[in-house]
Amino acid sequence: MNDPQSLGDTSPEEFRRQLHELADWIADFRQHIGSLRVAPNDKPGAILAALPAEPPEEGEPFEEILGDVDRVIVPGMVHWSHPMFLGYFGWTTTAPAILGEIITAPLNVNAMTWRTCPAATELETVVVDWIRQWVHLPQEFGGVVYDTASVGVMHALAVAREEAAPSTRKRGLVGAGAPVFRIYVSEQAHSSAEKAAIALGLGEENVQRVPTDAQFRMDPSVLREMITRDVRDNFRPLAVIATVGTTSTASVDPVPEISKICRENKMWLHIDGAYGAGFSILPENKSLTVGWSEADSIVVNPHKSLFVPLDFSVLYVRDLDRLRRVFTLVPEYLRGDTVEAQKNYMDYGIQLGRRFRALKAWVIFRSFGREGMAARLREHVRLANLFANWIKDDARFKLAASVSLGVVCFRFVGSVTGGGDAGPRSAPSATEDKLDQLNSEIVEKINASGRAYLTQTKLRARTVMRIGLGNVLTTEDHLRKAWEMIRETAEAL
Ligand SMILES: Cc1ncc(COP(=O)(O)O)c(C=O)c1O
């Protein structure tokens, strides 16, 4: 045990052998992923039962550990990279992404400050600026990489709060005599707005949900009325979050109109482009970006639509220094590593230790180029529209929303007519309740089969099925199989 030879790391020769073994394992996994079940069929607790509860007392050979990955972990997973995974936004990984993650591991970076890793800091600046150019944001926007969009919106609202109630950072909301702030999002917006309000002490109930139009877009005239009413009732309208690519239908809020309302009321405009913003790298989607230059902040999730595996989310703020002013804080033990007048990313958020996320994105972006990514996104949009056409050709199904980007929401209506593009609304409610149940059952049955994976959501209180195209391995053939499966499952019910 105390033999100095046995201390330290694995020997270089042994490590090299293990790496070669792992390289083959990764290549095999990737090549054969389509033959795995998409989702496990185990009952909750099966993984726990298959693993020892006691921690290991002695070290084990790598082969044994990898064997357990094959035996317990891989069959216990939902495979988000599987070509038949059509859930959420069809999030993907790619070979360049895997290579990027492998390169990152041995570098063992902590990019707290420029000095603690100049390359990671400067590469983050480069990659964030590439994305800024791709999504057509003006140069005055600076960005920072976080893990998720949820963390991004929390930071954006922290800046909005500080600017509306200066010295909240120092004295807290009560100490700063802050009013009761209100934040407005569409009723289709992601719940990260409420989570941010909880974390910032703004209060979940002060996130007000604005109704949407027939296309599930925020209705600016109602937004205006809600703001007027809140001002009259002594609330202070703080921010609007406009979504470009909502979670259920990928609808796009009318940013220019919302931006005008924000300007008139001196409110912060945050754009949640977590999913949709990435699609603006397609020249034919440039119109998506109208009004973005007026925003105070915007979040873009390359881990949803730009082929970077989880996690990688960028928050852009118009004048990034506004973010730094709220979060910079240098403890004595870090002073020596913060002396240069360089960017220290720890100043732009609550996180101190920061991993090297920019490297994987850099490898992916260089491997595909904008053209390669655009071509793949374009294919996903084509597949989404193709799927929508199949639905339109089958009277037993209805589109539940217009197809937007890579997302299709649809509803099995059987022989009942009703619904339509703006959402299923018309059949008698007992029938609609029954259809809700059937739609849910179709998704449950397909997911339980392990052959494909879909999601379900509610639109106008009705259950609909939903697919998201975004996986580089998904082809027209896979999609056709999924459609057959949906039709057969619906018929069998
Ligand atoms: C529109 C939108 N915004 C924000 C989020 C939250 O993303 P993250 O998981 O990066 O926090 C999601 C997640 O699906 C989303 O759909």
Image: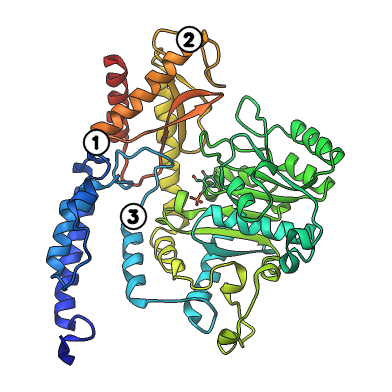
- Residue at mark 1 to residue at mark 2: CA–CA distance: 31 Å
Q: Is residue 198 left or right of residue 301?
A: right
Q: Quadrant of the C terminus?
A: top left
Whichever of callouts 1 and 2 sits on the residue coming sooner in the sequence is 2
Q: Mark 1: few, some, or many residues within 10 Å (few <14, many ≥20)?
A: some
Q: Is residue 339 visible?
A: yes
Instruction: Name the residue nearer the viewer: 386 or 97.
Output: 97
Depth check, mark 1 against mark 3: the one in front is 1
Depth check, mark 1 against mark 2: the one in front is 2
Residue 334 pos. (x, y %): 56, 84
The residue under the point 51% across, 70% down is 124
Q: Is residue 332 left or right of residue 76?
A: right
Q: Is residue 156 left or right of residue 20?
A: right
Residue 152 pos. (x, y %): 58, 57
Which numbered marker is on residue 94? 3
Q: Amino acid at mark 3?
A: Thr
- Residue at mark 2 to residue at mark 3: CA–CA distance: 45 Å
The residue under the point 48% across, 75% down is 120
Whether disc 1's CB lies below 8 Å from ligand 1 is answered no
The total number of labels drawn is 3
Whichever of callouts 1 and 3 sits on the residue coming sooner in the sequence is 3
Seen in the picture, residue 156 relative to 492 is either above or below; the reply is: below
Q: Is residue 136 visible?
A: no
Q: State the SS at label 2.
A: helix
Q: Quadrant of the N terminus?
A: bottom left
- In the picture, residue 51 is in which quadrant? bottom left
Mark 1 sits on what residue? 450
Whichever of callouts 2 and 3 sits on the residue coming sooner in the sequence is 3
Asked if the residue at tag 3 contacts the one at tag 1, i.e. Cβ–Cβ closer than 8 Å, the answer is: no
Mark 2 sits on what residue? 430
